[in-house]
Image (cartoon, rainbow, N blue to C red):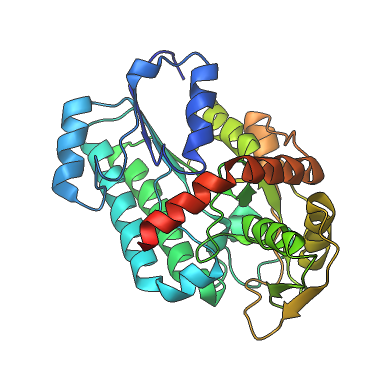
Amino acid sequence: MANPQRVLLTGASGFLGGHVLPELLRTGQAREQIQTPSSRQLDLTDRVATRAFFERTQPELVIHLAARVGGIGANQQHPGTFFRDNMLMGVHVLDEAMRAKVAKVVLVGTVCGYPKFAKVPFRESELFDGYPEETNAPYGIAKRSLFVMAEAYRKEFGLNAICLLPTNLYGPGDNFELGSSHVIPAMIRKMVDAQRQGNAPVELWGDGSPTRDFLYVQDAARAIVSAAASYDRAEPINLGSGREVLMSHLAEQIQAVVGHQGRLRWDSNRPNGQPRRVLDASSARAAIGFEPQVELTEGLRRTHQWYLENELQILDKERGRSS
């Protein structure tokens, strides 16, 4: 990736985008050459608006992070919205990048696109070997379909679009709103609240038996910027830690970090999600030299500390949305 160049970073105000932007700057990219429109400034589900933006800014590199995302509950409540919006945003970005002859597009997908019962560890060659876990299938299939579109546009139009598959991300800046958050911020918030209530019991979804692969968000940002600079092949590559973590053990680790000493109650009437999930990250190691740097316990400690430092602002925003 030559620096500086004109860059469009979609989703820059989101969780992952908030870490990719400083990583781009760290590598020497000029800030004034990076377009970071918010969803209010650019509605990527609107083809006309997206085309006008590409024509006006003429990006040379597009890193597409904008997405409609959430935890299991949010996916269950809004499957149609998640499918529609993620498809529309991705289709418009790829199509306008092709029309504008953008030099490179980085598509960031999701581990949710893998089959529900994929062989562990998940390998990129098996991405299409079955249907995703039902609670997040619309979101996962939308993202998976965009990989097909990227490959098709590469073959027909010569678009250099690369595809990355990050695992479950966590870290500072994550979404801690319980109605839409993923598992780590949800557990941290629940345990912080319970600790303040005299170490009250904490109710957690599922039975604690699923496994997950967690990647610290700054590690993911490094990998994305590295791939933007040096990876040009059609085959998607996984971004993960390669470490399989049992949910019950994760809860105990977070409990230790927070200092909560009450009971953990697993509600088996709530969905578990995918039974097992861990990525084979050897392709990223070979292709871009990627190695995660932040171990889970340290990442949980940093994430907990960030939540405590920003809790009042988070609560104020939630009250503002509900009023």
Examine the rendered structure and indicate whether residue 160 appears above or below residue 171.
Answer: above
User: Residue at the location (47% across, 69% down)?
Assistant: 75
Q: Quadrant of the C terminus?
A: bottom left
Where is residue 201 shown, x and y percent of the image? 77, 73
User: Residue at the location (78% across, 52% down)?
Assistant: 258
**Relative to residue 88, is residue 22 drawn left or right?**
right
Residue 286 quadrant: top right
Where is residue 192 shown, x and y percent of the image? 71, 57
Examine the rendered structure and indicate whether residue 297 appears above or below residue 190.
Answer: above
- Residue 158 visible in the displayed image: yes
User: Residue at the location (61% across, 72% down)?
Assistant: 116
User: Residue at the location (54% across, 17% down)?
Assistant: 27
The outermost residue toward the bottom is 269
Where is residue 49 shown, x and y percent of the image? 16, 43
Residue nearest the viewer, comparing 122 with 92:
92
**Relative to residue 131, is residue 218 drawn left or right?**
right
Residue nearest the viewer, comparing 40 with 149:
40
- Residue 68 visible in the displayed image: no
Examine the rendered structure and indicate whether residue 42 appears above or below residue 59.
Answer: below
Examine the rendered structure and indicate whether residue 46 appears above or below residue 206.
Answer: above
Residue nearest the viewer, comparing 61 with 179:
179
**Relative to residue 128, is residue 58 drawn left or right?**
left
Mark count: 0
Where is residue 269 shown, x and y percent of the image? 65, 86
